[in-house]
Image (tube, rainbow, N blue to C red):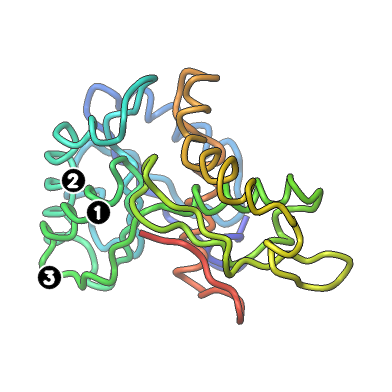
Amino acid sequence: NGSVFGKDQPIILVLLDITPMMGVLDGVLMELQDCALPLLKDVVATDKEEVAFKDLDVAVLVGSMPRRDGMERKDLLKANVKIFKSQGTALDKYAKKSVKVIVVGNPANTNCLTASKSAPSIPKENFSCLTRLDHNRAKAQVALKLGVTSDDVKNVIIWGNHSSTQYPDVNHAKVKLQGKEVGVYEAIKNDSWLKGEFITTVQQRGAAVIKARKLSSAMSAAKAICDHIRDIWFGTPEGEFVSMG
């Protein structure tokens, strides 16, 4: 709908999956075609990296072993090194050198490093990984506490790895109340909540979602990816900053 790359930017979407999943991927392709999206110029489904990564402007690497109930992100490390090494090598060989690479598959920070090291001809600053979901979760918790919308909250920070050891920081965060921006600490007036329950809720939100729906976050992760790419593509509004790995 133009919310990521702009209202006038046509998109060619290339979908890569493993060979056994090509039937499912073809179903996704058909649904995308049936959406009749005005900016979707073409959709390509493939199991070949040389096709998927050819001349890419943006690569979103979501393919990794899924996290299950009771698993930590570090448990995924060994299984995913092979995937991201292969995809990094393919990016290096086939993609544009200006390609922007966003790593989503967990553990995202380590997978991003693996992909980057496997693509030495692509500038390191072109690689980033998703902490925007944690960022959005922090904004949402503040908004819920104050009875405002998430758009009224800005400048939260997620420090550290995308894991249960992350540190959500609202020391610089602002919230709009009755048309005026004030600091989050000043607005909430509950330091013990901000230094306790708020932090643990954000840290453990992914695990809570998995426990409830038996699957990793889906809609919220997709929204976070869109937010992340838009801010890389266009930059953030003046006076506003966001979190990326």
Q: State the residue position of label 1.
A: 112
Quadrant housing residue 66: top left
Q: State the residue position of label 2.
A: 84
Earlier along the polypeptide chain: callout 3 or callout 1? 1
Foreground label between 1 and 2 = 1
Q: Position of residue 126 (x, y in %)?
A: 29, 69
Residue contact between numbered discs 1 and 2, judged by CB atoms under 8 Å = yes
Q: Where is residue 77 in the image (x, y as percent from the top left)?
A: 19, 37
Q: Which residue is drawn at 53% across and 71% down?
A: 241
Q: Left or right: 159 with respect to 186?
A: left
Q: Which of 134 and 194 is in front in this view?
A: 194
Residue contact between numbered discs 2 and 3, judged by CB atoms under 8 Å = no
Q: Where is residue 226 in the image (x, y as percent from the top left)?
A: 52, 54
Q: Residue at x 30, y 38 (%)?
A: 63
Q: Which residue is drawn at 32% across and 25% down?
A: 71
- Please name the amino acid that badge 1 sits on: Cys
Q: Which of 172 and 107 is in front in this view?
A: 172
- Please name the amino acid that badge 2 sits on: Phe
Q: Which mark is residue 137?
A: none
Q: Is mark 2 on a helix, strand or loop?
A: helix
- Real-space CA distance between mark 3 and mark 1, rounded to the nearest whole angstrom: 15 Å
Q: Position of residue 36 (x, y in %)?
A: 61, 44
Q: Left or right: 156 with respect to 87?
A: right
- Please name the amino acid that badge 3 sits on: Ser
Q: Is residue 170 above or below residue 107?
A: below
Q: State the residue position of label 3.
A: 121
